[in-house]
Image (cartoon, rainbow, N blue to C red):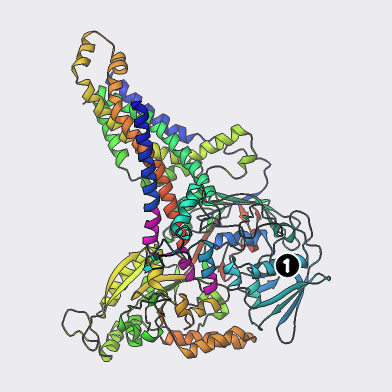
Amino acid sequence: MKHRMLYILILAALILSACGGAPSGANGATDEPSVVHVGWAGSPDSLNPGLAILTESYTIFDLVYDSMYNLNLDGSFTLNLADSVDRSDDGLVYTFKIKDGIKWHDGKPLTAEDVSFSYNLYKDTPEYPYLNGYYTPYFSSIESTEKNEVVLTLTEAIPNLESQLVFLYIIPKHIWENENKVEFENTAMIGSGPFKMAEYVQNEFVRLTANKEHFATPPKVDEVIFQTFENQDALVQAIKTGQMDMITEMPNTAVASLKTVENVEVVVGAPFSPGVSDIIFNQTEEENCPTPEEGGICTGHPALRDRNVRLAMSHATDKQKLIDVVLLGLGTPGLTLIPDGLGVWYNDSLKDYEFDVAQANQILDDAGYLDTDGDKIRELPDGSRPLTFRLNWPSDSISAPRTAELLSEMWGEIGITLEMQAVDPDALTSQCCPAFDFDIMLWGWASDPDPSALLYVYTSEAIPTGSSETGYSNPVYDDLYAKQQIELDFEARKAIVWEMQKIVHEDVVYIIPFYEQATQAYRTDRFTGWITNQAKVELPDSSSLVLIEPVK
Amino acid sequence: MNRTRALIKKITWSIFTILFVIVLNFFLFRVLPGDPARAGIRDPRLKKEAVEMLRVRFGLDKQVINCFESLNPIKVGSCTVNPLDTQFFIYARNLLQGELGISYHTNRPVADVLAERLWNTVLLIGAGQILSIIIGVVFGVFAAWKARTSIDYVAVITSLMAWSLPTFWLAIILLFWGSNNGLPLAGKASPGSSALPLLQQWVDIARHMILPTLTYTIVYMGEYTLIMRSSLMDVLSEDYILTAKAKGLSTFQILKDHALKNAMLPLVTVIAINLGFTVAGAIQIEAVIFLARAGQRDF
């Protein structure tokens, strides 16, 4: 009797697990279309190009829409929607000759009128702050002509029109003119790009079908499905077992083991939107502190305003160790906010401060920061305050706690102690800028293809607006920033941009511990033709998805 | 008569509770640091006017409530503003009209976003609760009836383990197991399944529900088994059970007619409390993650 009961228990457990083990109708694909299953851990925040912020939205826009220029994975631009572009001698007027015969997914023709409609909409809708704040401020007027041409007139001659246009996707006038621009969710998403929107459930999946009639790059596969996963371990598991054909992200801890899996290829390289991790020093001087109305509090430790202290901390920072421990080696040492992933804009001639603890100690000794009371912590030259800094980081960061631990150890070697605390990202923002109510922070940026946005972060103008995180102010730098904004000659602009990086590197405005690398993976037994030999790694880019075809 | 009065009392109390929750929630988010427009400030692409525009769009340019412009940092404002034109009253009025506003994160109506997620949650909790109650009660009854035998020990140890397992850990372990058995690891339904016949759609959803439901069931099953066991053991030691045995009733009859009915009471209480907590808990977790996402920039 006793035993029988035990059997029943075991049986119940077995039944329970068997319920899970019986997949119904999982296989049985015979003459199915070729479907690429892409796994990612995100989901678009909005399909309205004016409102979207997340990169996942832009990935979908890139596939479903066309824009005037394509951004290639080597960082260059190619003209896409137009046959030719003509620039006036003063650099103010651009005339694009739109290709004939391009069709929207609903069969209607795409003309210059759609292009001018889109640009005017982005420029004139105040609710699209991310687009008109940064991409269209120099647009004066956009008109279409009867010869299927678009005439774009600028208020100032700017050197980087390609990067200004690349994220301004062309949307169909015949649909958008009847919609409320702010409330329109655009889930049907009629575009002209190589893929058509078929089905979308936010936070679950995006299903796209191929637009085999695309004028430039008709895809070879029939369908692409982007599936959202709740966590990255599930993503890794899904590509291991073949549920997914490609994944766009994974934890660094999974890279080594995934590399050994048969039929899976891991790709590592600069991300499409290169990322920067930064160690932010609050160096706001009293005269630069934003007014109380602007939100300025400015409680930074005075020692951090001294370049010698920042320089010593730079020498005491072992970046390679940070990369090895925090990123498991998947990163490159950083110099300034302009990451190596930006290609030509990255000043690779700069020499980083050598990791040398003795030299770091020497710098602090010479500058008068001595440990006068023998507690192993240095004091200010006047002896009034120890070099004890608050170090904060956003609590949702995975890498920051480890970085903080290591920094505490490294800087301890030169007589600096840290009071470490993770802070809710919202709270950190309000401590950060323009309040400047902190000493040191760990945070980061994602970069545009053009360096201008991140160069702006160092300017004095950015201090009261909240974009500047350091309160750094240097009139020479500010002048150069204004100059590169309007320098039309590529080489000359590049020289200025390089010079600016030299200045902020010499002033040790930040310590940039590393530039993180992107890690993606695809299954070799499903599709072939993925582009992996370019400067940037971005498998879900249209350049790969239109080329791949099923393995025979 | 008495019943009507009790009902009125209950309703009045629940109205007060809801009002309290509304007020508390509103001010809680104002006292906590950070506002959505400020989170946008950290983007160098956003100009000052754009941030101002965002504030206007989400109504954050208005005073929080009379005499206070903001609560973090505390900023005293005008006390003569029309109270109906303050953030609090606009919020309260919209809420009463069922208008939950627009999500900072997705720019979609919050009600739509919640409705989508609520359906998943209800499906998961419904299936999970039913399964865990059935299994928990069966295991608990066996364990109590066969107290201090190997069956009891197995049931108690298994339940204790299941109950004390960290949910996320259990979920990851089941995920590995599920992926090797061809179970879907993400989503509520397969892309494209909405074109299938209804029955196949349901099968598809069921397949997607297996892993989360299993996790939920295992976690709650343990609790129910333990409660069922201990309350049934209490009841079984009562004199009237001995009387029932002496009358020659069968085990099944004793359990069904005499013991279980009385022993169910604590379990029913716990189930009711759990239901309330899990629905609220799931929504809260989703809402918190949601807000955090709207605020964060990188990483």
Between residue A66 and residue A433, name the one nearer to us.
A433
Asked if residue A231 can be seen in this view, the reply is no
Q: Is residue A154 above or below residue A38?
A: below
Residue A352 sits in quarter: bottom left
Residue A274: % across, % down:
52, 70
Magenta highlight range? B25-50
Residue A441: % across, % down:
37, 72
Q: Which residue is mark 1?
A: A115
Using residue B193 as the reference point, say whether residue B208 is left or right of it. Answer: left
The chief SS type of the magenta part is helix
Using residue A12 as the reference point, say whether residue A413 is left or right of it. Answer: left
Tell me the residue at 35%/40% (across/down): B13
- Which image quarter holds the N terminus of chain A? top left
Residue lying at the far front in this picture: please name it: B80
Tell me the residue at 38%/27% (across/down): A11
Between residue A371 and residue A294, name the one nearer to us.
A294
* Parent chain of label 1: A
Q: Is residue A73 above or below residue A246?
A: below
